[in-house]
Image (tube, rainbow, N blue to C red):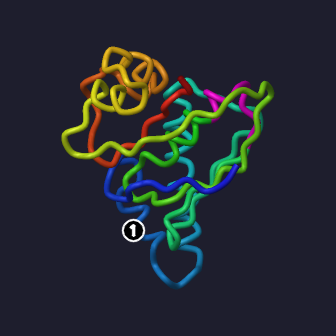
Amino acid sequence: MGILDFVKEAGEALLGSKAQAAEAPAPGPDADDANRKAAEAIENYIKTQNLDATGLTVTFDGASRTVTVFGVAADQATKEKILLCCGNVKGVEKVDDKMSVSTASAEASYHTVEKGDTLSAISKKVYGDANKYNVIFEANKPMLSSPDKIYPGQVLRIPPA
């Protein structure tokens, strides 16, 4: 549990003008509605990735650009994938992890993709073996559809060696 940082300008374009409206400084019904719609869009995105958690609840605060996510995931990998789905969204800077897991296991680390990164290069840096790129690819499915489809600012799960 804790706060994860993300690159606000990178990620899935789920929020659109809803997030801009939610960022308005004056709290009120318009900002509340925009925050609710943004949270729904993120929660729907999680569901399209076939990720689930008991009691999954997502909230969004446009003023702080923070997603808060609650629920109980079946395992650590599912929890981490849900957190990445929340944070790898344009307009989101932070994810406040309030989730727990039914079956505990070792936590993954995270890597923010930089310009020029490849999964092979990340694998070489993390594991000392460029050929282990598929471990990182598999750990980030279904969000990644191909090892070549990573982008600067994206945050990836890096499973323990």
**Residue 93 magenta-drawn?**
no
Q: What residue do we see at 56% from left, 27% from top?
A: 160
What is the crowding at mark 1: few (fewer than 14 residues within 10 Å), some, or many (at least 20)? Answer: some
**Which residue ends up furthest to the right in the rendered image?**
102
Q: Residue furthest bottom?
A: 26
As drawn, which residue projects farthest toward the left? Answer: 116
The foreground one among 28 and 91 is 91
Residue to which mark 1 is pinned: 20
Q: Position of residue 151 (x, y in %)?
A: 27, 40
Q: Nearer the viewer, residue 116 or 143?
A: 116
Q: Quadrant of residue 143?
A: top left
- Label 1 residue SS: helix
For the residue pair 102 and 134, the one nearer the viewer reads as: 134
Is residue 12 in view?
no
Residue visible at 53% across and 27% down? 159
Which three-letter amino acid code belongs to the residue tagged 1? Answer: Gln
Residue 135 is situated, as x and y percent measured from the top left of the image, at 44, 18
Residue at 48 percent of width and 69 percent of height:
22
10 to 117, vertically: above or below: below
Residue closer to the observer: 49 or 76: 76
Relative horizontal placement of residue 29, taking residue 156 as reference (left or right): right
- The percent position of residue 59, horizontal first and vertical second, equals 62, 56
Q: How many marks?
A: 1
Q: Could you say where residue 24 lies in the image, as x and y percent from the top left? A: 45, 78
Q: Is residue 40 in view?
A: yes
Q: Is residue 93 left or right of residue 130?
A: right
* Residue 149 higher or lower than 154, as above or below: above
> What residue span does the magenta drawing correspond to?
71-79
